[in-house]
Image: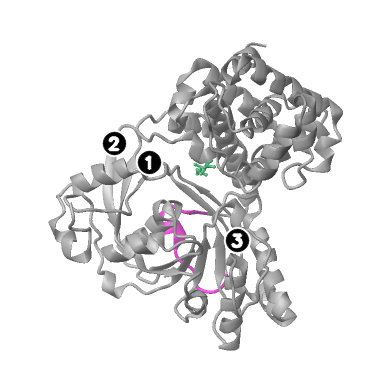
């Protein structure tokens, strides 16, 4: 199939495919999005699409990639159109998303991204650059490389031109994502001009957010299957689960979208949502990723289809739930039920190796902080200790069956060296708990906790991950 999904081919799509109801040409570029991956295309872009469908045409998206030209090379030949295939296990629906107007590849042309941020029509910047994208600024604002540098350079131009400030919304799975991004942007700005830093602090808004949608990486098979249904080739298609949630802290600068009208929650109590999501959903995901990868299980649904797998997730949740701050908005029991139903969705095929990526960046906010909080209250977090032991064993790059597993992590070279130098489980745990970027000193200093992790690691080594979990869930 060579004909691509394009403006000119939309009209020929089968009737079952949902098409946009608004005129794209009237769409204004009100949003700049940094990090134009599948998650954005399945999460924030459909929200701006829904606003346009309701007649608010201010929020067309200019997307930017800070890494490779791949996304531009996929989207631009199809007029920035793509399909979203929603599959909640029972029902499937495919719709065309047409809200992206243009794609910028920042490393090729950083000035274009800066200009987009500084454009008068821009009112909102959204950011999905993953946990490791929150780099300290290193370059100057005249040759920006990182996200905070691009943002500070764009804001500098806005201030010089007397334009309105922006609302900059971090949509990454970090605790306090808004204030983290604000601190980095301020740092980049201050290095240039402290008055710019002050303007950003006073005028711009960096709301914290909780974002949730499960988005498996698109495979060649998905592209073939969905294109066959469309009758045209869509190389940018994204598959996702039926559930989605976006909760934004009520903190905006200037004009803002009527987010509530399309199902986004705007709240003063963002911390409770963020905590519940990171610790229950993402925490369980990471647990399944390392234990599952060692046990030779490929997907989330296969993991919870095992009695021991489901029991482990429930025990982990029992352990973590008391660390959640009481909230009138989040009901942990109902939340757990809905998560388990999503995990069981077998039609998504959400691969555990996708989740296993970047563990050193993900574990702190998902499981390490709750572990420290539990220890501070006098409890030993034994389920978390088991997951950390699995992560530590996974760093050797071998599954229990001796197969190679890919450790895709910025710290992979270091962890692999530490693992190969360790003489036994205790050594290995001490060495890895010593990684400042992942574990606070408080944890390595706790000899009881280190011993607990080491005993789990011994079990995993000698029995394998599956039997180690079976042993754990029975006691
Ligand atoms: C996952 C998340 O890959 C991962 O680390 O835990 O991407 C998860 O699927 C999303 O946060 C769900 O909202």
The answer to which image quadrant residue 275 occupies is top right
Left or right position of 405 against 72: right
Q: Which residue is drawn at 86% across and 35% down?
A: 445
Q: CA gap, disc 2 to disc 1?
A: 9 Å
Q: Residue at x 79, y 43 (%)?
A: 440
Residue marked by disc 3: 207
In the image, residue 258 lies in the stretch drawn in magenta: yes
The magenta segment = 253-265
Check the picture and name the quadrant holding the C terminus. top right
| Foreground residue among 338 and 433 | 433
* Contact flag, marks 2 and 3 (Cβ < 8 Å): no
Which one is earlier in the sequence, the residue at label 2 or at label 1? Answer: 2
Looking at the image, is 326 positioned above or below residue 471?
Answer: below
Q: Is mark 2 on a helix, strand or loop?
A: loop
In the image, residue 192 lies in the stretch drawn in magenta: no
The answer to which image quadrant residue 3 occupies is bottom left
* Contact flag, marks 2 and 1 (Cβ < 8 Å): yes
Q: Please state the horizontal and vertical placement of residue 14, each as a whole percent of the image.
A: 14, 50
Q: What element carries label 3?
A: loop
- Decide: few, some or many residues near mark 3? Use Cα within 10 Å; few <14, some 14-19, many ≥20: many
- Decide: few, some or many residues near mark 1? Use Cα within 10 Å; few <14, some 14-19, many ≥20: some
Q: Residue at x 62, y 50 (%)?
A: 174
Residue marked by disc 1: 242
Residue marked by disc 2: 91
Q: Please state the horizontal and vertical placement of residue 218, each as a whole percent of the image.
A: 37, 45
| Foreground residue among 125 and 440 | 440
Q: Please state the horizontal and vertical placement of residue 264, each as a whole percent of the image.
A: 47, 54
Q: CA gap, disc 1 to disc 3?
A: 25 Å
């Amino acid at each position: 199939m060579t004909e691509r999904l394009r403006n000119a081919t939309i009209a020929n799509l089968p009737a079952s495919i949902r098409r946009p109801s608004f005129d794209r040409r009237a769409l204004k570029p009100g949003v700049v999005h940094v990090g134009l991956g599948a998650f954005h295309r399945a999460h924030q872009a459909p929200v701006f699409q829904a606003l346009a469908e309701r007649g608010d045409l201010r929020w067309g998206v200019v997307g930017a990639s800070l890494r490779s030209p791949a996304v531009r090379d996929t989207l631009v030949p199809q007029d920035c159109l793509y399909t979203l295939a929603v599959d909640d296990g029972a029902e499937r629906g495919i719709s065309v998303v047409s809200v992206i107007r243009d794609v910028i590849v920042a490393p090729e042309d950083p000035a274009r991204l800066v200009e987009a941020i500084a454009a008068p029509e821009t009112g909102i910047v959204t950011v999905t650059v993953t946990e490791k994208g929150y780099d300290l600024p290193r370059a100057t604002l005249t040759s920006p490389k990182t996200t905070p540098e691009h943002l500070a350079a764009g804001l500098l131009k806005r201030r010089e031109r007397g334009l309105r400030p922006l609302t900059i919304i971090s949509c990454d799975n970090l605790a306090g994502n808004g204030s983290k991004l604000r601190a980095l942007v301020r740092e980049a700005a201050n290095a240039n001009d402290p008055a710019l830093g002050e303007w950003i602090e006073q005028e711009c808004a960096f709301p914290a957010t909780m974002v949730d949608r499960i988005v498996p990486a698109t495979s060649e098979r998905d592209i073939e299957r969905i294109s066959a249904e469309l009758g045209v080739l869509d190389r940018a298609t994204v598959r996702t689960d039926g559930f989605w949630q976006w909760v934004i802290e009520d903190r905006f600068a200037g004009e803002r979208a009527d987010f509530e009208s399309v199902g986004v929650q705007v709240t003063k109590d963002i911390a409770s949502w963020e905590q519940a999501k990171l610790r229950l959903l993402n925490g369980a995901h990471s647990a399944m990723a390392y234990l599952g990868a060692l046990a030779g299980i490929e997907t989330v649904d296969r993991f919870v289809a095992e009695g021991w797998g489901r029991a482990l997730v429930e025990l982990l949740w029992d352990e973590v739930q008391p660390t959640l701050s009481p909230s009138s908005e989040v009901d942990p029991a109902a939340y757990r039920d809905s998560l388990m139903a999503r995990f069981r969705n077998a039609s998504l095929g959400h691969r555990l190796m996708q989740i296993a990526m970047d563990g050193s960046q993900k574990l702190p906010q998902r499981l390490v902080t709750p572990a420290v909080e539990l220890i501070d209250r006098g409890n030993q977090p034994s389920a978390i200790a088991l997951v950390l032991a699995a992560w530590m064993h996974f760093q050797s790059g071998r599954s229990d069956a001796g197969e190679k597993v890919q450790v895709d992590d910025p710290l992979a070279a270091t962890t692999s060296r530490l693992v190969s130098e360790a003489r036994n489980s205790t050594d290995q745990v001490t060495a890895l708990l010593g990684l400042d970027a992942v574990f606070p000193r408080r944890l390595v200093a706790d000899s009881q906790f280190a011993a607990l992790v080491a005993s789990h690691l011994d079990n995993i080594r000698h029995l394998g991950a599956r039997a180690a979990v079976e042993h754990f869930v029975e006691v």
